[in-house]
Image (cartoon, rainbow, N blue to C red):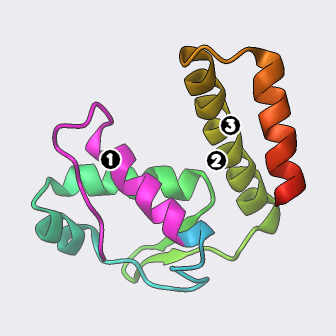
Amino acid sequence: MNLIINHSSMQPIYEQISGQIKEKIIHNDLIEGSCLPSVRTLARELRISALTVKKSYDILEQEGFIITVHGKGSFVASANQELLAEEKRREVEAELEQAIRKGRSCGLKDSEIRELFQILLEEG
């Protein structure tokens, strides 16, 4: 599995892993029923502790993105369209918040940001 770990990031490694796997599921790079690498295999690939990978898988399972069958492995769960849609909405919201902060830090007024947003909406 092609995951990139940034050891200098402030984000914990287990969150980086679960976030990247979640992204792959949301964007259909990993489809329903796909088998994830075993905890040990992924830990060996990424050169990190198996406990870190286990924590990532536990988070993904709690959030409903994967299921784990003891003795068989972890698999991408049935696509819960509502869950995936909510995750995408959160993603868009975070990016919009970042754009607003950036605009304000550049000295744009809220009215200018709204006007720019409206222009972009009309073009799209």
Tag 3–tag 1 contact (CB < 8 Å): no
Q: Amino acid at mark 3?
A: Leu
Checking the image for residue 91, the label placed there is: 2
Q: Amino acid at mark 1?
A: Tyr
- Tell me the distance, in whole angstroms, between the alpha carbons under discs 2 and 1: 19 Å
Q: Earlier in the sequence, mark 2 or mark 3?
A: 2
Which picture quadrant has residue 10?
top left
Q: Residues within 10 Å of mark 1 (few under 14, many from 20)?
A: many
Relative placement, left or right, of 81 versus 54 is: right
- Determine which residue is flagged by label 3: 96
Q: Which residue range is magenta in the image?
A: 1-24
Q: Quadrant of the C terminus?
A: bottom right
Which picture quadrant has residue 93?
top right
Q: Position of residue 9 (x, y in %)?
A: 25, 37
User: Residue at the spot x=55%, y=75% of the render?
Assistant: 76
Q: Position of residue 61 (x, y in %)?
A: 53, 58
Checking the image for residue 14, the label placed there is: 1
Q: Amino acid at mark 2?
A: Glu
How many dots with numbers?
3
Relative placement, left or right, of 61 versus 48 is: right
Looking at the rendered structure, the secondary structure element under dot 1 is: helix
